[in-house]
């Protein structure tokens, strides 16, 4: 479990993904942050927590925004063309660029504070 902040403020609705740094050592785990920026991991198999191992951490948050273009709707009228807007710095989106790395240790309280910056 842990907390995600961006520029000192809690981030609500961020997707947090722990991906094993070494193939076969660990299992991917994910979570979504609440209004206080807090998250509790669960594995892809739906089990709570994360298995021991070393992970890179990706954190993303997106919203859909209009592009300014309009297209005809099948039932008539026009609608906005939408695109995905990333609300957190790009470096946290990919395993190759994220600076966030953690180690989950068995038998210990594994809590993480991720303070994202531009």
Image (spheres, rainbow, N blue to C red):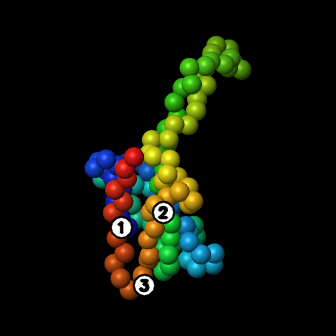
Residue depicted at x 62% and y 18%: 70
Residue 61 in percent (x, y) is at: 47, 46
The answer to whether residue 77 is left or right of residue 33 is right
Q: Is label 2 in a helix, a strand or a loop?
A: strand
The residue wearing badge 3 is 106
Number of other residues with Cα within 10 Å of mark 3, as a class: few under 14, some 14 to 19, many 20 or more: few
Q: Is label 3 in a helix, a strand or a loop?
A: loop
Number of other residues with Cα within 10 Å of mark 1, as a class: few under 14, some 14 to 19, many 20 or more: some
Task: Give whichever of discs 1 and 2 has the lower sequence position.
Answer: 2
Residue 11 in percent (x, y) is at: 36, 49
Instruction: Assign the N terminus to one quadrant of the image.
Output: bottom left
The residue wearing badge 2 is 57
Residue 37 in percent (x, y) is at: 34, 54
Are the residues flagged by discs 1 and 2 in contact, CB closer than 8 Å?
A: yes
Is 82 above or below relative to 49? above
* Marks 2/3: CA–CA distance: 18 Å
Is 39 above or below relative to 111? above
The residue wearing badge 1 is 112
The answer to whether residue 40 is left or right of residue 86 is left
């Amino acid at each position: 479990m842990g907390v995600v902040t961006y520029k000192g403020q809690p981030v609500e609705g961020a997707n947090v993904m722990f991906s094993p740094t070494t193939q076969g050592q660990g299992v991917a785990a994910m979570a979504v942050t609440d209004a206080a920026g807090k998250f509790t991991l669960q594995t892809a198999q739906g089990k709570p927590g994360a298995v021991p191992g070393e992970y890179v951490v990706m954190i993303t948050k997106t919203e859909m925004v209009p592009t300014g273009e309009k297209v005809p709707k099948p039932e008539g009228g026009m609608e906005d063309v939408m695109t995905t807007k990333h609300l957190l710095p790009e470096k946290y989106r990919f395993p190759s660029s994220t600076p966030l790395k953690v180690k989950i240790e068995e038998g210990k309280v594994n809590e993480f504070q991720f303070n994202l910056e531009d």
